[in-house]
Each structure stands twice: as C-alpha cells, then as structure tokens.
C-alpha cells in the first residue's frame, strides 16, 4: 500500500480585505464598555481576534468574511446594541452560478486550508438547478472508524490518466502475454487549467504550476504560454495542442509526460505523429461537451487515446444547444455510452466547466467521471471577485495584473485544494468507500431530485410539465 497522501497547508492571509456577507452595526453611545465578557471576545469562531483593533479605532463598517452566521454575538449582547446587516458590496460578487457565498467559501479555504462550516446550518432552498438537485448518501457516517481525515483509515484518492489494457492475458509461466502501456497516476482526482477569459499573468501561471507540482497533479497549459519560467514544472504540465500547431512544439512534447490534442474528425493521424516523437507519451483528447460528445467518446475509445477531456461552458452547461443540459446529465450520458459499448474500463474521462465547489467534484465522479479539471477557482483562490471588470477593460480591484508572489499564490491554491481533498475524503468515509475509483459511476450512493419526485408524486400527478415563458 502506498504511503498516505498528505497536503501540507499553511495559513496564507489575503492581500486585500475580503468582502464578507455581513457588516456590523453598533450603537456605541449605548455601550457601557464595562462588560467583562464582551460578545466579541466570546465569539466561538474567534473572528474578532484579528479585528479587535476596530473597538479602539472606531472604524466603520467592519467586514468579517469569516463570520459563520451563528448570531451568538447579536443574541448575547447585554445592551442589545450589536447587530448584523448584509454587506451591500457582497451582492456584487460573481453571478447567478458563481454565487457570492461560493466565492466567500473559496476565499476562506484558500486562506486557511480548512473545510468551511456554517454556524447557522444550511438555509438555502431544498432543491436547485444542476448539482443542487443531487444529494450524496451518508449512510455510513455513524461508524466511528470512518474518519480518513484524522488518520484512522486509509482512503485512496488516486486516479489514472493512462489507458488500461482489458482483459489481461497471461502465459503458462504466469507472465503477461500483453504489452502493458505506460502508467501515469496522479494522487488526486483533479487537474488544473487556467481560465482563458480572466486576468492571467506570468506570476499566476507560475503559482498554479508550482501548486500542481507540489500536489502531484497536472496542469493543462497553452503552448504559447509555456515560457522558460515554467520549465522546472515540466513533468506536471500538459501542453494543449491543435492538429495544426503541435508540429511546431516538438521540444515541449519531448519534455512532457502527457499532451492534450483538440478533437478533429481525423485525430488518429495526429496520434501517430506525436507517438513517433515520444512513444510512452500519454495522450489526452479535448472534446466539446455538445450533443455528439457521447458518440465521439465511443468512436475514439478504440484509438490510441488515454483520456478524454470534455469541456462545458463556465456554468457547466452543454455547448451549442438551444436548451443546454447540465454537466451531471452529460457526464452520465457519456459514461453509460462507454459502458454499453464495453469500453469504459479502457479510457479515462475528465470534465471541466462549472466545477465550483468540492461537492461538485464528488458528484461528478458519482455521475461517471474519473476526475475533474478546475479553472475559475484558481483565480478565485488568488482573490479574484469575478466582477468581470477586466472583460470591459476596467482595472482589477485586487490588482491581479500586478506582481503576485508565486510562493504566496501557490500556497493559496494548495490550501484550497487541500480543503477540497479533505471534503472528498469525508464524503467517501461517510459512504464507506475507501477508493475514489470505486466511487466512479456509483449512482446508487446518490439521490436525484427528479427520480425522487417521480417516485413520490409521479403516480398521482404524472410527469412534470415544463411551461415556457414565451
């Protein structure tokens, strides 16, 4: 058994004051100032510890993005002068999918490396769109040995990127009768890819590459962005080529363990050329997640490709469709297409677009993915607010286009992914699953709102009717 995988975290404070959900309101003229146990000092989460200077400087307002919404301070103030209000700037974060609460949680995880908690519990809707209409089965959570975070059991999160030979054949002397292809395994079911439509500087690329190197995972990078500063991390970089430009980057192909190639109808011809440069190379194919994604996956499964990378839009929606489906439905369709074709065990599937929370990674694997490729959250770890000012030619409020210390940036990303890794282990431990590859396609350990609704109300009311607004 390999040694237990561990991600070292280190508290990495933000460069700019983060935007919290709440602002404090205090009527100071009524404060006696004589309470021996001020509610600020008694905060169970200690969120006032670093902000206690506020009491002497009288600065207003005080933004506390680490507040867990338990409101103990409001309830226990002896004078009743302490209250919380929604921070108006908080409402400007993100959009309808990358919501403000998601960005705030990602900031917290990048800062501390810890799993976010909510003192007030979950107060959102019962069901939502996309992954919010899917729940995981926690039936084993009561077992005390299910505690992988604290070392009581071994939970493996490794996935393969390389192709598998099935079935294996043996000679009479029990030696393998088939040639085993090169094996590339990464210790976590996620890879990196920097977003194309946000501010990406040289220091941000170095930060992400250094984080990928320390985590032991891979980062997909465009060949034009592959500078000499990234060479120390070459074994963790996956150059992403097209059928037209890979011939100009032979030096990058020879340095890499894996490369990605954009899908074309005759992509097999490019496989032969690339493998001619480096036979042991792992080949990934970048495929748009549209209506033909499943059939393309089945078509390519019998070629020399090792891994298929399907990409949706930033909101996890199907591409080029009038009524786009969401990521979880598309993953399920592609996975089952390969299962029906008896080739699912040969290749690996990774998906990008709309992976915004740790639970999305776990749910994508349950739907049938081997792993995910994260993008926007790498920028969010570096304090991006997803305000999209950069798209309109305006200045960045957190100066992502200025110099960023790669050591600071890489540790912020490592902290974030460590929190994600721990959340995945918690989910698997609560399910009684010790191997992430065992979780792949295990929809029996999940509950889908559509199925529950049909089982409960379908016999009475029939299928749900979707009424258009037009």
Image: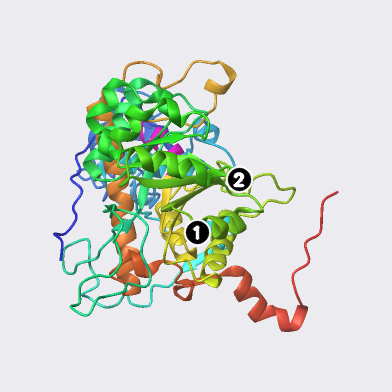
Q: In front here: 292 or 193?
A: 292
Check if residue 72 falls in the magenta segment: no
Q: Which residue is located at x 24 percent, y 65 percent?
A: 155
Residue nearer the viewer, 117 or 416: 416
Write down the residue under mark 2: 265
Relative placement, left or right, of 125 versus 51 is right
Can you identify the residue that label 1 sits on? 301
Q: Which residues are magenta?
A: 374-382
The outermost residue toward the front is 172
Main SS class of the magenta portion in the image: helix
- The stretch drawn in magenta includes residue 381: yes
Image coordinates of residue 10 in percent, x first then y, are: 19, 39
Q: Residue at x 27, y 41 (%)?
A: 414
Within-10-Å neighbours for mark 2: few <14, some 14–19, many 20+: few
Circle 1 SS class: loop
Residue ID at (36%, 62%): 164
């Amino acid at each position: 058994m390999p040694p237990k995988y561990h991600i070292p975290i280190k508290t990495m404070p933000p460069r700019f004051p983060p935007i919290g959900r709440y602002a404090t309101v205090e009527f100071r003229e009524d404060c006696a100032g004589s309470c021996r146990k001020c509610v600020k000092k008694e905060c169970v989460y200690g969120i006032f510890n670093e902000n206690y200077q506020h009491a002497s400087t009288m600065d207003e307002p005080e933004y506390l993005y680490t507040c867990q919404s338990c409101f103990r301070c409001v309830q226990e103030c002896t004078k009743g002068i302490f209250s919380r209000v929604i921070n108006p700037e908080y409402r400007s974060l993100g959009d309808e999918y990358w919501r403000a609460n998601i960005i705030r949680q990602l900031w917290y995880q990048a800062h501390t490396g810890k799993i976010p908690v909510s003192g007030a519990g979950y107060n959102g809707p019962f069901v939502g769109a996309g992954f919010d209409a899917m729940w995981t089965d926690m039936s084993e959570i009561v077992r005390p040995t299910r505690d992988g975070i604290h070392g009581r059991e071994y939970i493996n999160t490794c996935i393969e990127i390389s192709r598998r030979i099935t079935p294996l054949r043996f000679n009479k002397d029990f030696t393998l009768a088939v040639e085993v292809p090169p094996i590339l395994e990464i210790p976590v079911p996620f890879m990196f890819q920097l977003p194309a439509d946000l501010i990406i500087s040289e220091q941000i690329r170095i930060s992400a590459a250094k984080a990928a190197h320390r985590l032991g995972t891979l980062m997909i990078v465009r060949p034009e962005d592959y500078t000499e500063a990234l060479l120390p991390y070459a074994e963790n970089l996956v150059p992403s080529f097209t059928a037209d430009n890979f011939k100009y980057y032979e030096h990058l192909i020879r340095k890499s363990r894996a490369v990605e190639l954009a899908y074309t109808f005759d992509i097999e011809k490019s496989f032969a050329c690339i493998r001619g440069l480096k036979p042991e190379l792992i080949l990934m194919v970048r495929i748009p997640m549209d209506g033909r994604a499943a059939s393309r996956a089945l078509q390519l499964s019998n070629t020399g490709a090792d891994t298929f990378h399907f990409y949706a839009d930033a909101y996890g929606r199907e591409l080029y469709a009038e009524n786009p489906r969401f990521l979880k439905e598309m993953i399920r369709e592609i996975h089952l297409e390969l299962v029906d074709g008896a080739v699912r065990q040969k290749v690996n599937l990774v998906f990008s677009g709309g992976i915004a929370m740790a639970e999305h990674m776990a749910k994508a694997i349950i739907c049938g993915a081997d792993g995910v490729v994260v993008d926007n959250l790498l920028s969010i770890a570096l304090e991006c607010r997803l305000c999209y000012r950069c798209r309109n030619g305006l200045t960045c409020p957190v100066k992502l286009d200025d110099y960023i210390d790669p050591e600071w940036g890489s540790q912020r990303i490592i902290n974030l992914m460590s929190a994600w890794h721990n959340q995945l282990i918690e989910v698997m431990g609560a399910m009684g699953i010790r191997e992430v590859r065992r979780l792949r396609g295990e929809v029996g350990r999940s509950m889908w709102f559509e199925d529950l609704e049909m089982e409960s109300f379908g016999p009475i009311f029939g299928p749900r009717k979707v009424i258009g607004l037009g």
